[in-house]
Image (cartoon, rainbow, N blue to C red):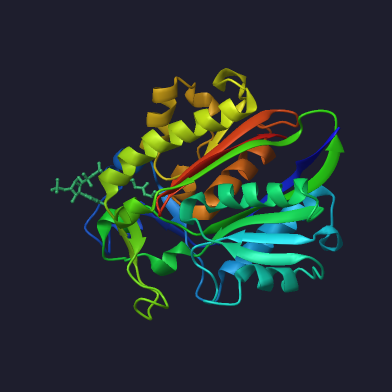
Amino acid sequence: MALRSVLLGVGSFLPERILTNEELAQSVDTNNEWIIERTGIRQRHIAGKNEKTSDLACAASLKALEASGRTADDIDLVIVATTTPDLTFPATAARVQAALGINKGAAFDLQAVCSGFIFALATADNALVRGQAKCALVIGAETFSRIVDWTDRGTCVLFGDGAGAVVLEAQERDDDRGVISTFLRTDGRMHDLLYVDGGPSETGTIGKVRMVGNAVFRNAVEHISGAMLEACARAGVSLDQVDWFVPHQANQRILDGVARKLDIAVDKVVSTVALHGNTSAASVPLALDVAVRDGRIKPGQLVLMEALGGGLTWGAALVRL
Ligand code: COA
């Protein structure tokens, strides 16, 4: 028997407003064909003016709680992975905790940009298996549209808003259900490939996303593949044993490139990028939720989640549902 972090439920939320490629092409020099060919993205959801990251996070969390059979009273750890917090402080997680009526344990935000959910899952797993918490709400939530430069066609076509959440519970088990292995990596030397040109300390502004697209692309294929292999190696599992791959939804060509590099069948890779765009820390739990709810991912199956983001950060998590 060993204490394991078991994933009991997943939920997600997307803002109502959809921004299509055609609509985008009316305000910036791009077109639907280019965006689909280079990224696979057809549309993205955009949060309303008064819709905050914490609102999206709460909506996703309520669905995850419902799916998990647990209530707010059971939760004693809230981690929100986000790059677009409601305010500089306090943590968006503290707002989510209060709004959901959770009144024990800790709540904090985690910043690893698009890899944030993987980092948050690993952090929650560590807390649960050490007995520091019993039931964790792990959320990826973004109003990324707020930090997009809507005049930069190289970035604005890529991103969208949304949230996804999972409930993890510490359980003594004699099987391998739950988080099996995680791998996290940051290489700060690649800061300039993907960053926001503002912040409270450096500029006193929020800033906008800046990216060297093709360099990020190359790094994504290489490091995501490496992280997947590392997470599997740590668990003594081969890629063929994995039932589903749930990658960060940055670009369909990155998903395809990784699948090709590792010789993975594309029908085992969950892709929501066409409909959601890149929702940063929200994209992995959003994609997981879609594939769990449509019946593709079933209880007992082995799922490998992976991501790369600004920092650069990257990582992977192997979970048996
Ligand atoms: N519409 C039309 N043309 C565009 C465009 C757009 N939205 N964005 C860029 N272009 C143009 C460029 O200006 C360039 O034109 P030029 O050849 O006349 O200079 C041409 O398309 C090719 O640009 P390039 O940047 O080399 O294209 P690409 O094939 O690398 O695709 C990205 C660009 C951004 C789609 C791609 O690099 C990418 O997805 N990178 C990874 C981004 C990512 O995932 N970031 C988040 C990680 S978490």
In the displayed orientation, state which residue is furthest to the bottom.
204
From the viewer's side, name the closer residue of 61 and 33.
Answer: 61
Q: Is residue 157 above or below residue 105?
A: above
Identified at 38% across, 81% down, the residue is 204
From the viewer's side, name the closer residue of 176 and 185.
Answer: 185
- Asked where in the image residue 108 lies, by quadrant, the reply is bottom right
Q: Is residue 168 visible?
A: no
Residue 12's spot in the image, x, y percent?
Answer: 64, 53
Residue 304's spot in the image, x, y percent?
Answer: 59, 33
Quarter placement of the C terminus: top right
80 to the left or right of 189 = right
Identified at 73% across, 66% down, the residue is 106
Identified at 52% across, 60% down, the residue is 111
Q: Is residue 320 visible?
A: yes
Identified at 30% across, 53% down, the residue is 193
Residue 284's spot in the image, x, y percent?
Answer: 56, 45
312 to the left or right of 1 = left
Q: Is residue 137 above or below residue 219?
A: below
Q: Is residue 97 above or below residue 291?
A: below
Residue 211's spot in the image, x, y percent?
Answer: 30, 55
- Asked where in the image residue 146 lies, by quadrant, the reply is bottom left
